[in-house]
């Protein structure tokens, strides 16, 4: 299965394992809740989907790389305790709490989540000293004398032997106690994820043109050469930060992340050309409705790679504008909820400024807990931090009564609403300018299908069009087989 199918099945498993009957007991007893085992090549996103599942199911996540643990840290240290049995005092060996199980309780304290996922990565690389205890743990969910808390589900991941010399094969007894899911890399599924997290469009465009270079593992006379999804994503993060700082990325940077010399060199050459096209065509100007005179004649004569780059750059530039509008919308929504509480909780017994600071303190505490918990979307956390910092810097004056304090804060909120209105208006115009360019440059060509398909993979775009319908976006999504024909269309474009 691909990573998306695995994610869906894991979410279904979480729902089933956490389902309760009318008495409040779990429908599937803990002893029958088989741990999930994801087995697949390194760097395809096994850890990422665990984070996504925890966030979307609103449960906790405690993640550990099991290879970092010894028997002592995982099981706990033995100590002697005096016990009385049948009137006789005895010295009994007990164990301190496992570092892993203690970590679950710490996560529960930080996040307030009483249920969650305990995720153990690289489980088939467990140390020899710990291996004998794993069977007991997988079946009885116990390390030493301590069980994992009720409501916590065990999930694990490992790499097949061909990718890691340190792995141990699971025996039949162990496998018979797990839900085994084999996961394979899938570029189209990864691209949808890449759009969500904002992977550099030069990388997604390159992989659109060179799909075979998405995931490669080869061992020849030159040694091990490999490319993974993790490598592309980490490279993207560095490139975006370099660009924001005005730092130029040389070819050696690509070789540091892409451990296949031919692919790294080819990707760097494409990246270099990608930026040249961006400058030559003036993508920012196109989205402002200002198209340079020679652009249409040039793109009519352009090769396939160049045309696809321009489409991707336009989609990416529009995506950034839509992302800005989505950010202003979420900030306005969060601010509205704060103001609503500030107004509704005023009872005349507490000074408005005291209530205000108390609510801001709650926001800050909530933000810090969510950040430490690690199961909330980064963009949401960034907006929550932005809000409490704004509120912290603009408190009402001490001598204001409740209405005055609320009106004072509402003025700041109204300013945010104006920012939102401007951002959404800018996005509406940019959408129309983008479609104007696409239709004039490519008429009814298949490049428009590629462009609209990219928009359908952009969550901010889908949300924006739900509130601000775009006639042409609707027309193309309804009249064309978006997604299902994309690979065929790209082949047709290349041949053309």
Image (cartoon, rainbow, N blue to C red):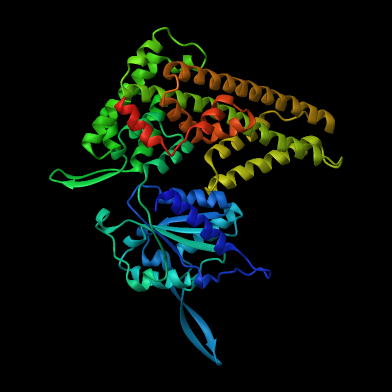
Above or below — where is 318 with respect to 62?
Answer: above
Looking at the image, can residue 250 be seen?
Answer: no
Which quarter shows the C terminus?
top left
Q: Quadrant of residue 470?
A: top right
Q: Nearer the viewer, residue 355 or 150?
A: 150
Q: Is 409 situated left or right of 155 in this image?
A: right
Q: Residue at x 56, y 92 (%)?
A: 87
- Where is residue 402? Give x, y as percent: 83, 33
Q: Residue most toward the top?
A: 293
Q: Residue most toward the right?
A: 348
- Where is residue 318? Give x, y as percent: 50, 24
Labels in figure, total = 0
Q: Residue at x 51, y 51 (%)?
A: 53
Q: Residue most toward the left?
A: 221
Above or below — where is 109 with respect to 78?
Answer: above
Q: Nearer the viewer, residue 437 or 277?
A: 437
- Where is residue 115? Give x, y as percent: 57, 59
Q: Nearer the viewer, residue 276 or 117?
A: 276
Looking at the image, can residue 332 be seen?
Answer: yes
Q: Residue at x 71, y 38 (%)?
A: 337
Above or below — where is 201 with respect to 188?
Answer: above
């Amino acid at each position: 299965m691909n990573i998306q199918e695995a994610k869906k099945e894991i979410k279904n498993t979480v729902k089933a394992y956490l389902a309760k009957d009318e008495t409040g007991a779990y429908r599937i007893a803990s002893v029958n809740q088989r741990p999930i085992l994801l087995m697949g090549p390194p760097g395809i996103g096994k850890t990422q989907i665990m984070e996504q599942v925890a966030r979307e199911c609103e449960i906790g996540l405690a993640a550990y790389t099991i290879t970092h643990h010894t028997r002592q840290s995982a099981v706990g240290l033995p100590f002697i305790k005096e016990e009385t049995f049948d009137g006789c005092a005895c010295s009994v060996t007990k164990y301190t709490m496992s570092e892993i199980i203690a970590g679950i309780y710490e996560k529960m304290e930080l996040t307030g989540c009483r249920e969650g996922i305990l995720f153990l990565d690289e489980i088939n690389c467990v140390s020899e000293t710990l291996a004998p205890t794993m069977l007991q743990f997988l079946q009885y969910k116990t390390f030493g004398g301590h069980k994992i808390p009720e409501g916590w589900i065990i999930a694990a991941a490992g790499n097949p032997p061909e990718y890691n010399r340190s792995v141990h094969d699971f025996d039949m007894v162990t496998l018979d106690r797990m839900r085994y899911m084999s996961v394979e890399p899938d570029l189209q599924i990864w691209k949808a994820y890449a759009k969500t997290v904002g992977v550099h469009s030069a990388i997604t465009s390159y992989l659109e043109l060179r799909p075979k270079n998405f995931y490669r593992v080869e061992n020849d006379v030159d040694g091990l050469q490999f490319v993974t999804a993790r490598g592309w994503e980490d490279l993207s993060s560095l490139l975006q930060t370099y660009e924001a700082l005005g730092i130029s990325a040389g070819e050696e940077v690509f070789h540091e992340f892409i451990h296949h010399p031919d692919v790294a060199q080819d990707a760097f050459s494409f990246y270099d050309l990608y930026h040249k096209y961006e400058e030559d065509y003036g993508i920012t100007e196109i989205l402002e409705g200002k198209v340079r005179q020679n652009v249409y004649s040039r793109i009519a004569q352009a090769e396939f790679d160049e045309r696809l780059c321009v489409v991707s750059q336009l989609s990416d530039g529009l995506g950034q504008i839509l992302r800005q509008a989505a950010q202003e919308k979420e900030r306005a929504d969060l601010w509205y909820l704060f103001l609503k509480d500030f107004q509704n909780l005023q009872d005349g017994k507490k000074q408005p400024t005291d209530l205000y600071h108390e609510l801001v303190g709650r926001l800050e505490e909530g933000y810090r807990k969510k950040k430490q918990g690690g199961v909330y979307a980064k963009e949401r956390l960034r907006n929550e931090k932005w809000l409490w910092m704004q509120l912290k810097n603009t408190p009402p004056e001490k001598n204001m009564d409740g209405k005055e304090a609320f009106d004072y804060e509402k003025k700041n909120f109204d300013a945010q609403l104006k920012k939102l209105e401007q951002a959404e208006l800018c996005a509406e115009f940019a959408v129309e300018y983008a479609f104007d360019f696409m239709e004039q440059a490519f008429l009814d060509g298949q490049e428009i299908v590629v462009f609209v398909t990219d928009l359908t993979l952009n969550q901010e775009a889908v949300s924006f069009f739900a509130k601000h319908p775009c006639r042409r976006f609707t027309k193309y999504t309804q009249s064309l087989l978006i997604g299902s024909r994309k690979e065929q269309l790209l082949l047709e474009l290349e041949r053309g």
